[in-house]
């Protein structure tokens, strides 16, 4: 069963059994200071193992006072104010952070000096591409934290501040990515990067990322960030080479590619 997105007051929350968590995606000031406790009550009622929240610096203490811990910090993320990913662990097995192998992958990604190139033509995707996008996401990821294998969900996202971009070869979509815009905070999440197995190793993710950055800078966004699989050297390399800085790890945070995985947060000021 996929997780669902709901309003809690004026804030937006994603929760459910797939990721076994409650995730505060967008905080509204009107819901403070009671929101941290309300998230815990929801997680306890639904039996979720973790609560993770994306919060600005000026509300951080309200979460810390309720027992949340900072897992990652993005400088200037929210209109110039630092943004924090804070977590509360009901399931202590969700703690732990990076494995030794993931630490080595992170160091390798950070030490790479190769500069990315925009070597592929990138186009903005639209409603008529939704079915092909859904098929690509289903092919690449055995599981995914959001229902990206559903074309209707993609269409919903398109109408709610998400721009999708792709690379096509012989008229067929072979790689895609998304820019999820947070207009209220002036930041954008670079996400949903996926490339067909037959076209990997060609720099398509880098081409997509560079193009998405240019598009978002033109729209006035100041900070880009991503939440990337810690176990994937390739995706961490893509962001590190493009100048993104490692900001922390969300421990056993996301059900992706068939398992609950650690996720690295990377960010860049444009």
Image: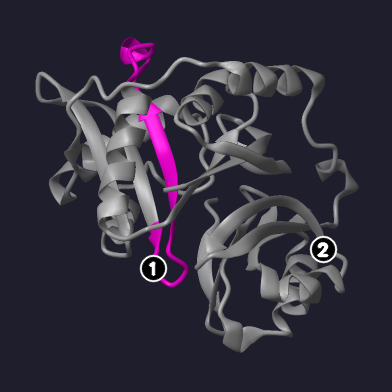
Give the residue number, with chain letter if any, for mark 1.
183
Residue 139: quarter of image: top left
Residue 198 colored in magenta in the image: yes
Q: Position of residue 107 (x, y in %)?
A: 69, 20
Q: Secondary structure at mark 1?
A: loop
Front residue of this view, candidates 148 and 201: 201
The residue at the point 34 percent across, 18 percent down is 203
* SS for dot 2: loop
Give percent across and percent down for residue 105: 66, 18
The residues colored magenta run: 181-203
Q: In this figure, which colouring scheme has been used for the structure?
A: one colour
Q: Which x, y percent locates residue 72?
A: 70, 49
In this view, the residue in front, 241 or 188, is 241
Q: Is residue 212 left or right of residue 240?
A: left
From the viewer's perspective, tell me whether residue 227 is left or right of residue 186. right
Does the magenta segment cover residue 244?
no
The answer to whether residue 23 is visible is no
Label 2 vs 1, first from the N-terminus:
2
Q: In percent of the image, x 52 and y 16: which residue is there? A: 113
Q: Is residue 239 visible?
A: yes
Which residue shows up at 24% across the image and 34% down it? 166
Q: Is residue 122 left or right of residue 212?
A: left
| Residue 36 against residue 213 in the figure, above or below | below
Please tell me whether residue 108 is drawn above or below residue 209 in the rendered image.
above
**Distance (Cα) linking label 2 and label 1:** 26 Å
User: Which of the numbered marks, if any, corresponds to residue 68?
Assistant: 2
Frontmost of labels 2 and 1 is 1
């Amino acid at each position: 069963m996929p997780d669902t997105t709901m309003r809690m007051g004026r804030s937006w929350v994603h929760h459910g059994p797939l990721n076994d968590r409650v995730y505060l995606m967008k905080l509204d000031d009107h819901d403070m200071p009671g929101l941290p406790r309300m998230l815990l009550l929801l997680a306890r009622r639904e039996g979720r193992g973790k609560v993770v929240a994306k919060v600005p610096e000026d509300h951080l203490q309200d979460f810390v006072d309720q027992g949340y811990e900072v897992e990652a910090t993005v400088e200037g993320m929210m209109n110039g104010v630092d943004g924090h990913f804070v977590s509360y662990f009901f399931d202590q097995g969700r703690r732990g952070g990076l494995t030794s192998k993931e630490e080595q992958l992170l160091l390798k990604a950070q030490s790479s000096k190769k500069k990315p190139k925009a070597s592929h033509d990138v186009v903005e995707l639209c409603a008529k591409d939704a079915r092909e996008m859904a098929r690509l996401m289903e092919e690449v990821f055995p599981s995914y934290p959001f229902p990206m294998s559903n074309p209707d969900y993609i269409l919903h996202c398109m109408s709610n501040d998400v721009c999708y971009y792709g690379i096509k070869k012989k008229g067929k979509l072979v790689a895609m990515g998304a820019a999820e815009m947070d207009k209220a905070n002036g930041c954008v999440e670079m996400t949903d990067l996926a490339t067909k197995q037959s076209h990997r190793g060609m720099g398509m993710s880098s081409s997509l990322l560079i193009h998405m950055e240019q598009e978002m800078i033109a729209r006035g966004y100041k900070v880009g960030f991503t939440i990337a699989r810690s176990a994937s050297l390739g995706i961490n390399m893509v962001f590190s080479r493009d100048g993104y800085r490692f900001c922390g790890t969300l421990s056993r945070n996301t059900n992706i590619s068939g398992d609950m995985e650690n996720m690295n947060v990377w960010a860049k000021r444009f």
